[in-house]
Every structure is written in C-alpha cells, then in structure tokens.
Amino acid sequence: MPGHKGFVLWFTGLSGAGKSTLANKLVAEFQTRGYNVELLDGDEVRTNLSKGLGFSKEDRDTNIRRIGWVARVLARNGVIAITAAISPYAEIRNEIRADVEKEGRAAFVEAFACAPLEALIERDVKGLYKKALAGEIANFTGVSDPYEAPEKPEFVAYTSEETVEQSAERLLAYLQEQGLIFQETA
Amino acid sequence: MPGHKGFVLWFTGLSGAGKSTLANKLVAEFQTRGYNVELLDGDEVRTNLSKGLGFSKEDRDTNIRRIGWVARVLARNGVIAITAAISPYAEIRNEIRADVEKEGRAAFVEAFACAPLEALIERDVKGLYKKALAGEIANFTGVSDPYEAPEKPEFVAYTSEETVEQSAERLLAYLQEQGLIFQETA
C-alpha cells in the first residue's frame, strides 16, 4: 500500500483462545486490501530462527524476543507484521513494544485474545489441556506455567463471546480510527 | 516505493573485501530514492537471532540460514533486503537463492565482493588477518576456514581495483537493467 506506515499487531493469549484464527482472518483482509502483511506464528519462527530452543522460561523468552525483532524490522519497512504466539510474559511483550516505540518508525498494537481458562479447557480443540492437566505436557501456559494478561492492551477480542468476524470487524475499525489502515471504500 | 517488488541483494566475500562499505553506500542511495531498505549484517543478526551460536561450520551455516530467512521474508514484502555476511559456503547461499526463487515473490541478486586474499592480508584494516595467520583466531575464512567464491554471481565488485563509487554505480545500473529499481530521474 503506497506510503503506508507499518505496524506490529501483537496477539497474545492462552492456547486455544483464538489468536491464530483471528490473525489469519486479518491477514486475508489486509491482503485483499493490498497491504504487505506477514504473519509470524510461533511454529514458523521456531523452525527458521529458533531450532534448538526448548520450552524453559529462558528459551521461550528468547523465542519471543526473536519474533519481536523480526516483527519490528518488518514494520519499520511499511509491513503489517502480525504475531500470534502465546507470549505469556508481560515483561517481554513490553520490552518489544518499547523497542518499536523508541525507534518511532512503526506502531505497536497489542491485541489480547481473551477467553476464560475454564472455557478453553472445556473446548480443548487440540486435546492439549487434557494432556497438560494430566501432567503429560510440562510448562503448559495457564496450567503449569503462568500467563500474564496485558494490563492495557490496545484491543481485546472476547473470543468466547463474539465470532471471529465480529472481533475482526471491531479490530479493523480500531486500526482505521488510529490511522493505521485506510478507510475501506466500497 | 509504491508497488515496488522487493529483492534480496546478497553480498558475499572475504573479510575486509568491502562488502559492508558497498552495502552501506547502497543503503544510503536506496533511502535517498525512497525505497524501503534493510541491511542485515552478520553482527546485528548474531545479536538478535543467533545468540549462543559459535563459529563451527554448523553454527555458521545456521546463522547464514537465519539471515537468509529474514531477508526472504522482507523481500517478499517489497523491501530491498541487503545482507553483508561473509557467507563462505556456496551450498548455503544457493539454498537461500532457491528458497527465494521457488517462492517467486522476490528476486535474488548475488553480489561478489572480489579482492585477492594477498591484498586483504596486506591491507588488514582490522588486524584480523594478522591474528588469524598467527593462529590467534580459529576458523577464520580464507586462512583457516574455506571460502567458496560464487560460480555465477549476478554481479562482481572488483573492490581492490575500483572505488566504492564505481562499484555502486555499476551495481545500480545492473539493478535498473533488470527492472529491480526504477530509472533515476534527474
């Protein structure tokens, strides 16, 4: 998109809270509108940048910092960089936000995929919570590892109460209000 | 630059052969012309993506592959991604080229900073060759580690025979010929 300023759209939330679903919905929407957009999900980054890292706090922090650096470099070049990793620690997310804002070449938008843990355990799409509760997966966020919800996210998607279309529509409206994307003309 | 297709401009060459000097010259030129351009040098990537990696062949390959992945992701989003790491192994460079070309969303331009090893040893700007020849630096490319020159680079800068301005001018002309940058209008 000509002359467009990039931004980092940083999703955070528990496993199964709908980060990737919403992120993919937005990727499709941004592509339709002609923006350069890149989705950095946890798995792709692990394969390409973080092979060898495990799931200790230190290794998870390193992985998130790497996602943050790539997202920042993309965004300062006019790309919409979307991340959809759990990113459980507020300190690391805030550090990445500070790096982006200090540079002043892109915006940072934290989008919290908010759903009650109980609902996620009940739904358990991938069967991971069951395994985590049975102790078969160590360091599982929300069960055996902490999740620190953002205190002041730019956007909250109530993914157990609204459809992905509703969340996406509200988020697009927010981004337009902020001047980060252009008004869609019919 | 509106509607501009990105490309990877991959410099390779021995330590001291002038990769970074030429890369920085081009960054300035592209910025003046209004392009989104990012220089990924070996050090920045090591700090942000490859902390913990050493200088064994395996670790160096991993570092270069990471630079390659970031450059590819940038270039497919319309950015001019310039790399200036020694990148001594042809196999890894060719693997990165193949990944970019297979995707078909950006071009790959290999630019060889060519200077005779003897000239670099004599000049030895950073004093590294002296140390490497004395055995104080292990795995030093060209001395105690191999350097595989590209067989068919898109561009060769003869950095011991031409000035950085001359190399830059020829390279810009090549990129214009290929339609990768627009003709400069006075």
Image: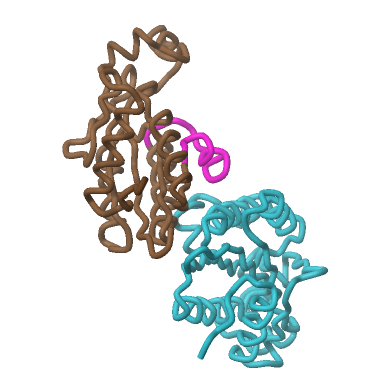
Chain colours: A brown, B cyan
In the image, the segment drawn in magenta is: A40-57
Compared with B2, A125 (above or below) is above
Judge by depth and name the residue closer to the eye, A78 or A181: A181
Horizontal arrangement in the rendering, residue A148 relative to residue A135 (left or right): left
On the question of residue B127 being in view, the answer is no
Compared with B61, A135 (above or below) is above
Relative image position of residue A11 (x, y in whole percent): 34, 37
Please tell me in which quadrant of the rendered image residue A112 appears. Answer: top left
Judge by depth and name the residue closer to the eye, B179 or A154: B179
Relative image position of residue A41 (x, y in whole percent): 47, 37
Residue at 28% in and 22% down: A162
Residue A49 forms part of the magenta stretch? yes
On the question of residue B51 being in view, the answer is yes
Residue B19 forms part of the magenta stretch? no
Please tell me in which quadrant of the rendered image residue B88 appears. Answer: bottom right
Judge by depth and name the residue closer to the eye, B2 or B59: B2
Q: Residue furthest front?
A: A186
Residue at 78% in and 68% down: B150
Please tell me in which quadrant of the rendered image residue A60 appears. Answer: top left
Q: Residue furthest left?
A: A151
Compared with A173, A183 (above or below) is below
Q: What is the count of numbered marks?
A: 0
Residue at 54% in and 79% down: B26
Q: Residue furthest right?
A: B151
Relative image position of residue A111 (x, y in whole percent): 28, 37
Horizontal arrangement in the rendering, residue B15 relative to residue A84 (left or right): right
Relative image position of residue A87 (x, y in whole percent): 35, 35
